[in-house]
Amino acid sequence: MVSLPSEAEWEKAARGGQQVPVRAKWGSSPGVLALPGENGQMDNPFPERLYPWGDDPDPNRAHYFDTGIWATSAVGCFPGGASPYGVEDLSGNVWEWTRSLYRDYPYDPDDGREAARTEGPRVVRGGSFDGHQRGVRCAFRLRLSPDLRGNGVGFRVVVSPGSPA
């Protein structure tokens, strides 16, 4: 199945889960010495990280206002900003649509926010090229009408395991 990510899936991709791949790159965060557990995973040393790479904003790791580039950029131009899973450009460049209806946070999967055929504002995450560092944090979220279009709004898709790619 191919779909937009839920808000929870987007945030996990940005911060990592309770466990992350040992091959993860930690950027400017303190060095991590860990032995891989089963399946090449280790405990996430920074599960509450503010940005996919750590806790400090950095225009060399994400495309936002401080880069001085006033348009979108190609995916992969900021590889130092990759998440613990190696996902690039989760912070900056464009706000990314999620399939989740906007509801209060913290996330509750049983509150109807994942009802596919329900109308209402959806959550966007990640910030954009013309936004400030606060907006590119992993926790920052906005509500937008699904019919909104603009230069600073885009999407990525999730392919579920077992789906033909």
Image (spheres, grey):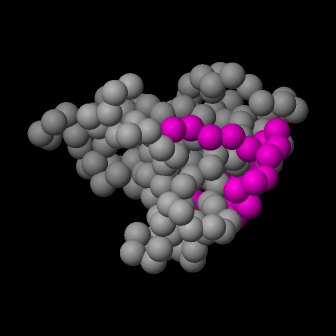
Q: Quadrant of the N terminus?
A: top left
Picture coordinates of residue 136, whole percent (x, y): 67, 49
Q: Residue 83 magenta-drawn?
A: no
Residue 69 image point, x, y percent: 84, 29
Give the camera-side residue of 108 and 76: 108
Main secondary structure found in the magenta portion:
loop
- Can you see residue 83? no
Verify whether residue 154 appears in magenta: yes
- The residue that appears at 66% across and 68% down in the rendered structure is 120
- Nearer to me, 40 or 156: 156
Residue at the farthest front position: 117
**Residue 89 visible somewhere in the drawing:** yes
Q: Position of residue 81 (x, y in %)?
A: 57, 34
Query: Image height check: is 82 above or below 132?
Result: above
- In the rendered view, tell whether residue 125 sits above or below residue 112: above
The quadrant in which residue 99 appears is bottom right
What's the residue at 53%, 63% (across, down)?
A: 117
| Left or right: 40 in relation to 67 | left
- In the picture, the quarter occupied by the C terminus is top left
User: Nearest the camera: 65 or 27?
Assistant: 65
Query: Which picture quadrant has residue 60?
Result: top right
Q: Position of residue 31 (x, y in %)?
A: 38, 37
In the image, 62: left or right of 114? right
Q: How many marks?
A: 0
Residue at coordinates 39% horizontally, 75% vertically from top-left? 110
| Range of residues picked out in magenta | 132-157
Give the residue displayed 54% in from the left and 74% down from the top.
105
